[in-house]
Image (tube, rainbow, N blue to C red):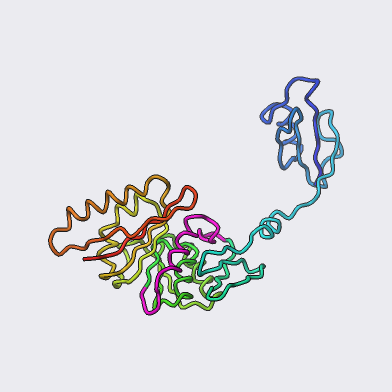
Amino acid sequence: MRAWRLGGAAAAPLAEEGPEAAALWAAGATAVWIDGPDLVAYFPDDAPATPPGDGRWEDVPEVDHVAAYLAGLTPVDAGAVVVAPTHCEAVLRAGQQVVWLDPGTAFGTGHHESTRLALEALGMLPLAGRRVLDVGAGSGLLAIAADKLGAADALGIDVDPDTVPVARANGERNRSRARFLVGGFGDVALEPVDVLVANLYAELHAAWLAAYAALTVLGGDLLLSGILDPRHELLRDALALLDDAGGVGGPRLAWVDARRDGAWWLVHLRRVV
């Protein structure tokens, strides 16, 4: 690939939408943009010998951007779980589990703060013998991690039919027993669970809080991530509304704690009634 540079310092200002740029696009440029006072157009190696304008050729090194991106991805240490791309070597401390996960079309590689918060919170819970539900499973990372950490059953659901095959493939790669279904919360027949984890957003958590509580067994834990600062207060308001609307015998949730990573929060609730 080569770049054709038009100098604009001594002439009329050049612009990406000006006539010079239009002529370069027409000549077969693959990209055109402003670099300081200059207009730079990128052409493939079989570009015309002399593109429009009084410019000069510059050599541009060929870069495999996908390879460069993958090379920059490193394992994520999230407490009891390390999430590692398959091209990396993962170094574990005693007691840690690894989940092999490559970036793909589904959200959740462990690099985002909200995902890391959920992984860390799962690692702090006793999961042995417990049923775990991941609402909005995406890549399947949280359900796979729960299975690796000893859950008796781990199920992930997602409304996006394109993400579920990705999650299942990630499960197979990790030899995980985690299962994945297409469907939204309330659309899929679900059995009561001991742990509900959801990396969504505050408004949706607040709207679904009563349904979350009804699905979680007494003493069960809810880990709600994806909450931007300061919207975690919406969960406190939703808890108060749940108390007001529940009546005698209705489910009750207690606020256990809230953890923050940058601008993102995770709220830990527990069913107490």
On the image, the x and y values in percent for residue 46 come to 83, 46
On the image, the x and y values in percent for residue 78 come to 52, 64
The number of callouts visible is 0
Quadrant of res 158? bottom left
On the image, the x and y values in percent for residue 140 come to 48, 67
Q: Which residue is drawn at 29% across and 52% down?
A: 207
Judged left or right of residue 49, residue 145 is: left
Judged left or right of residue 262, residue 252 is: left
On the image, the x and y values in percent for residue 242 come to 22, 55
- Magenta span contains residue 258: no
- Magenta span contains residue 122: yes
Quadrant of res 4? top right
Q: Which of 183 and 151 is in front in this view?
A: 151
Judged left or right of residue 21, residue 91 is: left
Q: Which residue is drawn at 52% across and 55% down?
A: 112
Residue 48 vertical position relative to residue 210 in the rendered view, above or below: above
Q: Which residue is drawn at 76% across and 52% down?
A: 63
Quadrant of res 128? bottom left
Q: Nearer the viewer, residue 129 or 171?
A: 129
Q: Residue at x 17, y 58 (%)?
A: 246
Query: The magenta stretch spans which residues?
Result: 104-131
